[in-house]
Image (cartoon, coloured by chain):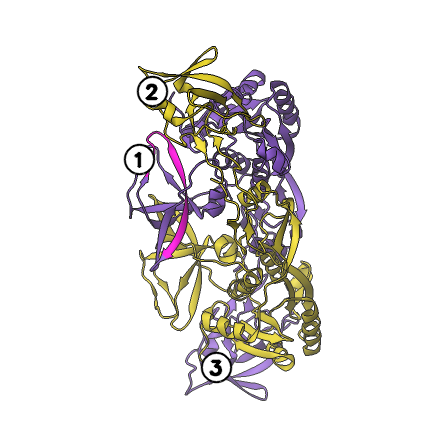
Chain colours: A purple, B yellow
Amino acid sequence: MKLMKVEEALQLFLKHVKIKETEIEYVSLNEALHRVLGEDIISPTDLPPFDRAAMDGFAVKSTDTFGASELSPVELKIIGESEIGRPFKGVLESGCAVRIDTGAKIPDGADAVVPKEYTKEFDDRVLIFKSVVPFENTAKKGEDVKRGEIILHKGKILEPYDIALLKALGISQVPVKKKPKIAVFSIGNELIEEFNPKLLEEGKIVDTNRIMICSLIKENGGECIDFGIIPDDSNEIRNALIKSTNFADIICTIGGISIGKRDFVAKVVNEIGTLIVRGVAIQPGKPVSLGVINGKPVVCLPGFPVSAFIAYCLFVKPLIFKMLGIKREYQMTVKGKLSRRLPGRLGRRVFVRVKLKTRDGDIIVEPLKTSGAGVLSSLCKADGILIIPENLEGFEKGFDVDVITLKDFHE
Amino acid sequence: MKLMKVEEALQLFLKHVKIKETEIEYVSLNEALHRVLGEDIISPTDLPPFDRAAMDGFAVKSTDTFGASELSPVELKIIGESEIGRPFKGVLESGCAVRIDTGAKIPDGADAVVPKEYTKEFDDRVLIFKSVVPFENTAKKGEDVKRGEIILHKGKILEPYDIALLKALGISQVPVKKKPKIAVFSIGNELIEEFNPKLLEEGKIVDTNRIMICSLIKENGGECIDFGIIPDDSNEIRNALIKSTNFADIICTIGGISIGKRDFVAKVVNEIGTLIVRGVAIQPGKPVSLGVINGKPVVCLPGFPVSAFIAYCLFVKPLIFKMLGIKREYQMTVKGKLSRRLPGRLGRRVFVRVKLKTRDGDIIVEPLKTSGAGVLSSLCKADGILIIPENLEGFEKGFDVDVITLKDFHE
């Protein structure tokens, strides 16, 4: 059976499920860090709201200073002061100067500031030793932000400086995207919730996938609805799936999806909804399946931890980002030299976990030896993911390769 | 006056203040995401705890299958089943096979698994159509994690897969570093807490730096103690500084540090403690000053928003990381082509805000035009930071440059 490529699978999936962006809710500035902006923010005001001094010194008419130099200074009359919170009220005439602080309002009539170090005061007179051009050493009204300008675009993840800018404009309640709700459940009779040496000896396995996937969802800006562990039982799986579609925007199952006698999930999805994609041409993660129940997207992740991780990043993360309206324009990669020959697998996109090391200023890309999809610790040891495309037999030793840092891959 | 380089300044600073790592506290797995691990985690157990099947099929003695092929299968006797949670109890003898599920325990005496698709069952017999070598299609005991192995190192920021691995090993209370406490206060008569058009017209400025710096501290794993706005008054600044050293691990002031008549902070620091660095050879951010009061590090950030941001990333973030025991081995950068000539400034390390665009598959690095340190919005528009070293006059158009993504720069 020819498996679909990642892009084909995702495209087909998105044709069958209509992904709607979540609604907007308002949060305070203190809660807004790393939330996703829900609408364009248009500045209600100019910042700064007037021309202001960019240096301590004297506000002048620039034309008055033309020709001023070290040897032949220009003399002006000091007629007042402009301080922050206490602007000079009058109008500056030719032949005059106003003492001014950094950030203070440029008096009407003045158009430049001579820095203090190029001046010398005598009583109510000041000598100017350097000419200035119009607007020199001033910050123009609207230089930072212009009134009516879109200052932050919908879909932006709010960073510390964005929050500062919102505060500068008096926006204290920020419109952000509601977090998409993702129902998560693990499937398998072998799974237990807590570590228990006796049960492990019998072959039971601690369910580690659910806490991993829930943490990833949290990182990606979603909200996890934890449905716990469901046994290998069609009825129970059916009930959980139907119930979850009432609460969640996305349903994410883990396990019970490889070809085998305990492969219940795909059948149940197809019975109460539509199974759209059954397996994708990736390694690890091949069994990942995509479906729709009651109009809600269902992503069935494989149970091997590394498979679950890769399939989550390829098929759940994009849904969350779409619901949040996040756009990613480019993928950041790190270029490095491959430390050894790395075979690919024709027809499969292979995701290799690698370590990054620096040697003589070069970045060396070292594929991890343990590559089984069951080896969770290989993710903990990795720095990045190297993708071998489906049409390549692999990379030779010393080849320049692009690595996605592991953090970029999942965040 | 010759200003110190960033590295010199930081080194001198760290010689005068003894930065101690914070203590350990225990948190549950659900609270551990992105916390910093406080000690090496040594695995108390093997994972998997026994050899297990990596495929559905039949557990066999590999020697029994030698020579088996499509045309001349080997016939074995089925003596039982091994399921997850219900392992086969007996010992497998030569000539026998045990039906086995993926993940189930390999019976004593067996050393490999023949996948189901290469077998055919007749009553209590099975035909094997393919030979297997020892350990084929099995996951060895300890393959994921070996007992006694350090699985996660002190100083690691805990990611979703790390939390999953901790869960797999039965570690439910995680030793993490306590968050360093950073006292933050803004200094300046011009500052107001809330947006107010009338006050802004008079030249007052909304204090946006404090929420930006507090958000950065939160991002970097610290805890912010917000001391609010302090006026330009030596007594009030003195009191706030002394008080803050009782609560905080690091003291971070913003503003009141440029050379000018309202330059109070450096004087007060030097009066009640020691001023170690007065200004650093960077642009923007030059006035940043470093001192010590009662053994606590004091970082005095400049008041211009972009200066405050850069100086924070260079001098506060490293202190927080040191207290948390975080090690960063390499700086991730994005290579791109410069869209226009970019002048530097000899003797200063210049931090240029840039946009990253893709054109015909190339990444184009476009310096933002507004470069004033007061222009907060330039940070909101930027994708990255391009550093022009102090010994370069700048970069030519088309030059290949390394850009640090803005997120990497502050996180």
Q: Give the image location of residue A395, x and y in percent.
A: 30, 41
Whether A344 is among the magenta residues is: yes
Structural distance between the alpha carbons of marks 1 and 2: 33 Å
Q: Nearer the viewer, residue B226 or A251?
A: A251
Whether A74 is among the magenta residues is: no
| Residue A236 figure quarter | top right
> Left or right: A173 with respect to A136?
right
Height in image: B165 above or below A111?
above
- Subunit of label 1: A
> Left or right: B54 with respect to B227?
left
Q: Give the image location of residue B238, x and y in percent.
A: 68, 76
Height in image: A256 above or below A157?
above
Residue labelled with disc 2: B68
Q: Give the image location of residue B85, x and y in percent.
A: 59, 28
Element assignment for label 2: loop
| Residue at (53% x, 43% y) in the render | B161
